Amino acid sequence: MCSFRASVRQKPLSFPRTNRITSYNSPRPTPRRSHRIQAGTTRDQPTFRVWVTDLTSPALLKMLQKTIGGPLDRAGSPLKFAPREGPDFFAAYGWKTAETRSVLHTAAKLKRSSCGMRLLPLLPDPAGRKPDKPWGGVCVFENKTSA
């Protein structure tokens, strides 16, 4: 297995993918991590052009904390991060939202929704931009500074 740094050197167009990692972080460290991904960690490491991660709205975070939050809290991995700005939160750190995809709408399109969730995708997709609506999705960001 090759190291992260070596894989970046071999494939400068590689992109980081962070699954659920942002949910476990508090809002303060996440901008720093976003900046580190933008700037790279060493002088000889190229910056990333694309970043893929999942994100939740504050409303979905609250629901998740009520349903699965207890065991995660006890395990020392509480769910903390769901920016009110949605994907636009990362714009201040050099990331432009290229695409967002709702997990619920994608599951419906692929016919992978549970019976109780089959009608929900008929509602419009807020693309993470309505903090009071439950939303979870995958976001693709482009680095504005490495173009």
Image (cartoon, rainbow, N blue to C red):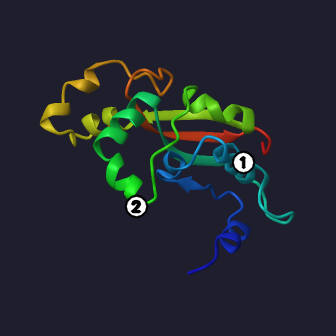
Q: Residue furthest right?
A: 43
Whether residue 27 is situated above or below residue 16 in the rendered picture: above
Residue at (73, 32) in percent of width and height: 92
Label of residue 32 in the image: 1
> Does residue 81 appear to the left or right of 37 in the view shown?
left
Kind of residue sitting beneath label 2 = Ala
Residue 7 at x, y percent in the picture: 65, 71
Q: Which residue is mark 2?
A: 75
Q: Residue furthest bottom?
A: 1
Q: Nearer the viewer, residue 120 or 8?
A: 120
Q: Nearer the viewer, residue 146 or 31?
A: 31
Residue 114 at x, y percent in the picture: 17, 39
> Does residue 107 appear to the left or right of 48 in the view shown?
left
Which badge, 1 or 2, is on the more N-terminal residue? 1
Residue 128 at x, y percent in the picture: 48, 28
Kind of residue sitting beneath label 1 = Arg
Please tell me whether mark 1 sits on a helix, a strand or a loop. helix
Q: Quadrant of the N terminus?
A: bottom right
Residue at (60, 56) in percent of width and height: 16
Residue at (68, 65) in percent of width and height: 11
The residue carrying pointer 1 sits among few (fewer than 14), some (14 to 19) or many (20 or more) residues within 10 Å by Cα, namely: few
Asked if labels 2 and 1 touch by Cβ distance under 8 angstroms, the answer is: no
Q: Nearer the viewer, residue 140 or 42?
A: 42
Q: Quadrant of residue 56?
A: top left
Please tell me whether mark 2 sits on a helix, a strand or a loop. loop
Residue 33 at x, y percent in the picture: 68, 51
Q: Quadrant of residue 14?
A: bottom right
Whether residue 11 is situated above or below residue 60 in the rendered picture: below
Cα distance between the residues tagged 1 and 2: 24 Å
The residue carrying pointer 2 sits among few (fewer than 14), some (14 to 19) or many (20 or more) residues within 10 Å by Cα, namely: few
Q: Quadrant of residue 2?
A: bottom right
Residue at (69, 66) in percent of width and height: 8
